[in-house]
Amino acid sequence: GDIDVCITSDEKVIGEAKKIVLPGVGSFDKGMSNLESSGLIPLLNQKVLIDKTPILGICLGMQLLSLQSEEGTKKGLGWIDAETIRFSFPKELNLKIPHMGWNYVSVKRENPLLDINAKQRFYFVHSYHVKCNNPSNVLATSDFGGEFTCAVNKENIYGTQFHPEKSLRFGMSVLKNFANL
C-alpha cells in the first residue's frame, strides 16, 4: 500500500500528522537552531510527549532527541535521556571519522521497527553517536571501534543513527514498519 508523505514545516500539517519523521544533516546546534526558528518545538512537544504521535529521528534527527551534544552548546529536545558524543579511539585502531559505510546492527529487544532475528546492514555516515543514560532506551547497537548505540526507542519515540533511506531493502523495511505503527 501507498503511504502519503509530505515534507513540511507547516504547523497545521504537522498538527494533523499521524507520524513524524525528523531528519537531520549537519551540526547539532544548526539543527536545533533551525527547529527553534521554525517555532515548531512547542507543537512537536505536544504531538510527541502528550498526544504520543510516533516520531522517527534519523541521523542528526536522532541526536536532536538527546539532552545535548559534544558538537555544540545548545540543549537538545531531551526526549531521550542521552548525550551525543564524538567517536574517540586509540590511535592504533586507525579508524577514520566520520564513520562511513555499511554496518551490521544488533537489535537488543523485540520492537515493531527492527526485526530482532534478521541479519541487517544499514548505511552510516556520522562522527557523533548517542550514549543512552537509560539502557532500556537502546534499541540496537553497531560496532565501530567498539559497540555504540545506533537506534533508540522510548514509547512512541524512535531514532536511527543510520540512514534507512539509503539502506536499500533493510532501510525500506524500517520505513515501512514505522509507517505501519
Image: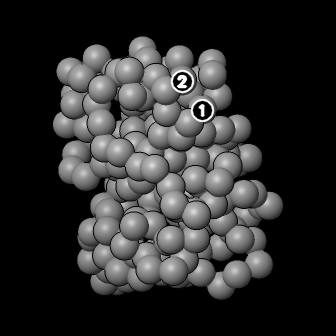
Tell me if residue 144 comes above or below residue 110 in the rendering: below
Name which of mark 1 and mark 2 comes first in the sequence. 2
Question: Is residue 53 found left or right of 112 in the rendered image?
Answer: left
Q: Which residue is mark 1?
A: 53
Question: Is residue 153 found left or right of 100 in the rendered image?
Answer: right
Amino acid beneath label 2: Lys
- Out of 82 and 139, give the one closest to the viewer: 139
Residue 115 position, x and y percent, is 71, 71
Amino acid beneath label 1: Thr
For residue 47, the mark is 2
Residue 143 position, x and y percent, is 52, 75
- In 3D space, how far apart are the residues under numbered discs 1 and 2 (Cα atoms)? 6 Å
Tell me if residue 150 comes above or below residue 133 in the rendering: below
Residue at disc 2, secondary structure? helix
| Residue name at image x 63 percent, y 18 percent | 50
Tell me if residue 41 comes above or below residue 26 in the rendering: above
> Pointers 1 and 2 in contact (CB under 8 A)?
yes
Residue 22 position, x and y percent, is 40, 43
